[in-house]
């Protein structure tokens, strides 16, 4: 009996070793600047990452080939950039990384602050978080970002003039507006002035401060502008600022009230000051500053009140971004196509042999 199990164990080890060797075999050699290989294991890693990002359980053989093609293009562009003397520093990658995670959070954060936030909300480390989200640990993700930025830099260096000269015409803006006019609708909006007094370690003192501020606002002893400035001082004990809410369930949740109470709030006039409401972590109250009625927006209307961005400018910016994205995609295609020369790379597996390797 021991002999049978021993043989089975050895066979299992041998099978695993053969599988590992298979994963390490190169599919492509890129040699534009230096000789580098793209292995089956690297392709599997990239496919697994895309599966996590897209939520797709599997990719077809043709889709895996497309991913392999993208990896070849990426490697060619990186080597072409290196040959041209272009590079991206680690500090530039870190800055781009911090900007991207700050955009997710909604405010500027450091890597340590983001790690603490992730830990508090999910219990995961950054490596675990990025592995869950995109199939890469933190260092692998930063390396991926660096490669993407180098490739982008190379494409931009060749196509900068054509990409910068893209503009959106007045006719395009007006045409887009006419086609999508029904989407440019403003709901009923209230501009509130919100005052929040954290309880911190002394709920009694916080309540006393909230009552004092409430009385000052209600009796107009201090202006909203003055409170905004005072609230920014570190030891003020409160925060104050403008808040815009639309008529909807989300706004009701934000204010800690039911929908009927929110509808009642929308009947109040400018100058109305709410009672102080005790929340789990703070005391807060608000005052109605202004009311904006629902309407269909025109091109010269602001997209949102007090933003100074008109519908016309908003459309211009959005169409401009679309043109830039489409133009950059075309530039990438043109540049990588020019690099796809026999002397720059070699497919080591193709046809049925490649298809067989992609059957996983």
Image: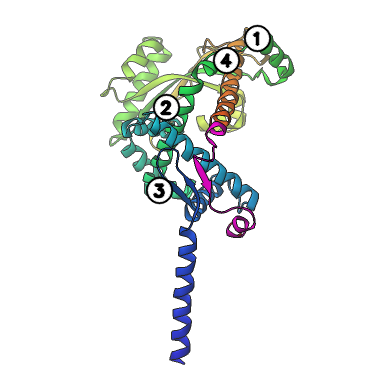
CA separation in Å, label 2 and label 3: 41 Å
The mark nearer the N terminus, 2 or 3, is 3
CA separation in Å, label 1 and label 3: 46 Å
Considering the numbered disc 3 on the image, is that residue within a helix, a strand or a loop? loop
| Mark number displayed over residue 299 | 1
Q: Position of residue 180 (x, y in %)?
A: 71, 19
Instruction: Name the residue at 56% across, 43% down.
Output: 69
| Of the pair 250 and 133, the residue shown nearer to us | 133
User: Circle 3 is placed at which residue position?
Assistant: 137
Question: Exactly how many numbered labels are in the figure?
Answer: 4
The verdict on residue 339 being magenta is yes
In front: mark 1 or mark 3? 3
In front: mark 1 or mark 4? 4
CA separation in Å, label 3 and label 4: 37 Å
The mark nearer the N terminus, 1 or 4, is 4
Q: Residues within 10 Å of mark 3 (few under 14, many from 20)?
A: some
CA separation in Å, label 2 and label 4: 48 Å
* Marks 3,4: beta carbons within 8 A: no
Q: Residues within 10 Å of mark 4 (few under 14, many from 20)?
A: few
Considering the numbered disc 1 on the image, is that residue within a helix, a strand or a loop? loop
| As drawn, 12 above or below 178 | below
Q: Residues within 10 Å of mark 2 (few under 14, many from 20)?
A: many
User: Circle 4 is placed at which residue position?
Assistant: 166
């Amino acid at each position: 009996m021991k002999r049978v199990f021993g043989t089975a164990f050895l066979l299992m080890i041998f099978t695993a070793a053969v599988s590992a060797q298979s994963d390490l075999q190169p599919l492509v050699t890129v040699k534009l600047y230096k000789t580098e290989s793209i292995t089956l294991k690297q392709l599997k890693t990239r496919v697994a990452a895309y599966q996590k990002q897209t939520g797709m359980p599997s990719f077809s053989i043709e889709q895996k080939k497309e991913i392999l093609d993208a990896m070849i293009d990426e490697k060619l562009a990186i080597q072409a950039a290196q040959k041209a003397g272009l590079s991206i520093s680690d500090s530039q990658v870190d800055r781009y990384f911090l900007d991207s995670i700050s955009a997710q959070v909604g405010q500027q954060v450091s890597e340590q602050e983001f790690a603490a936030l992730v830990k508090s909300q999910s219990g995961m480390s950054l490596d675990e978080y990025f592995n869950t989200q995109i199939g890469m640990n933190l260092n692998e993700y930063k390396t991926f970002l660096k490669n993407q930025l180098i490739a982008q830099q190379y494409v931009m260096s060749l196509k900068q003039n054509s990409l910068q000269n893209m503009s959106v015409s007045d006719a395009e803006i007006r045409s887009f507006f006419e086609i999508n006019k029904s989407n440019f609708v403003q709901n009923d909006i209230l501009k509130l002035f919100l005052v929040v007094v954290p309880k911190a370690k002394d709920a009694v003192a916080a309540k006393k401060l909230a009552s004092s501020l409430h009385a000052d606002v209600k009796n107009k002893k201090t202006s909203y502008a003055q409170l905004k400035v005072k609230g920014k001082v570190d030891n003020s004990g409160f925060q104050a600022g403008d808040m815009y809410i639309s008529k909807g369930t989300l706004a009701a949740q934000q204010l800690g009230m039911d929908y009927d109470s929110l509808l009642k709030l929308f009947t109040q006039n400018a100058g109305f000051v709410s009672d102080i409401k005790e929340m789990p972590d703070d005391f807060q109250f608000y005052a109605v500053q202004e009311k904006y009625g629902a309407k269909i927006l025109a091109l010269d209307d602001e997209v949102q009140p007090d933003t100074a961005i008109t519908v016309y400018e908003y459309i211009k910016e959005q169409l401009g971004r679309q043109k830039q994205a489409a133009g950059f995609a075309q530039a990438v295609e043109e540049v990588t196509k020019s690099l796809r020369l026999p002397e720059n790379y070699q497919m080591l597996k193709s046809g049925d042999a490649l298809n067989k390797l992609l059957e996983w």
